[in-house]
Image: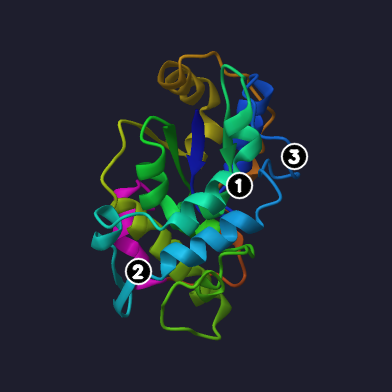
Amino acid sequence: MVTVIGRGHGGTRAMSHTLRESGVYMGALLNESGDLIPAEDLYEACRVMARYVEHRGGLEWEFSKLHTMPIAPEFTRLVESYLSSVLASDAEHKGWKLPETTLIYPWIVRMFPDVRYIHWSRDPRDSIIGAHLTDDLSDFGIPYEKTDDLRLRRAISWKYQREIVKATPPPKHTIEVRFEDFILNQDETLAKLDQFLGIPLAKIEVRPESVGRWKTDPEYREFEFLKKDLVELGYED
């Protein structure tokens, strides 16, 4: 089984469409973004896990108890309900994609330790241009210092999702993929994913102009707290 971990508006639909075109069963009903829907049960699971996230103030959160405490039975029930079509399928290769899965990554890893996790990243300066359901973390019960500044709110959401993934002990099977590499070097990136998943992946149509949109964004702003992540992910320029 495989899933894609990455913030919404990060280009994860490209990976979902690739998996589906390659014969991977991605669930009974998908939307245009390749998300498994309906997703209300997983959204509620996000709110359940968020009860155990401690906000230390600013851009710091404490996630440590999520790695050791018992997983809430309500959470397990909600996730299994959301994934019912995938879990019940006898397909040799199956999985799902929903950006909000990133919000509950610590418990997803514990529930599904053998899943192959594709960690998908995109330059946050591009990722926060468009609106996404996770822009306001409080909608999922996640504590943070709320702001009416929409672009700042999106940047905080990106940062939170980056931090919760970094704080989680890595699962047995994981690979990191940048959206930009998939778009600009698709053959090379697919070859790495082929090896990771053990199946040949189809090549889909991509749009090179989707890379670096922030450079012509009239509302572009720099956020100092993203600079370290830009360097770590290779987006220095």
Q: Residues within 10 Å of mark 2 (few under 14, many from 20)?
A: some
Q: Which residue is mark 2?
A: 53
Q: Considering the numbered disc 2 on the image, is that residue within a helix, a strand or a loop?
A: loop
Residue placed most toward the observer, 42 or 188:
42
**Badge 1 amino acid:** Ser
- Expressed as whole percent of the image width and height from the top left, the position of residue 30 reads 73, 41
Q: Which residue is mark 3?
A: 29
Q: Residues within 10 Å of mark 1 (few under 14, many from 20)?
A: some
Distance CA(mark 2)–CA(mark 1): 23 Å
Give the extent of the magenta segment: 223-237
- Please tell me which of labels 1 and 3 falls first in the chain: 3
- Expressed as whole percent of the image width and height from the top left, the position of residue 14 reads 62, 37
Judge whether 200 appears above or below 100 on screen: above
Judge whether 69 appears above or below 95 on screen: below
- Expressed as whole percent of the image width and height from the top left, the position of residue 90 reads 61, 20
Q: Nearer the viewer, mark 2 or mark 1?
A: 1
- Expressed as whole percent of the image width and height from the top left, the position of residue 10 reads 55, 50
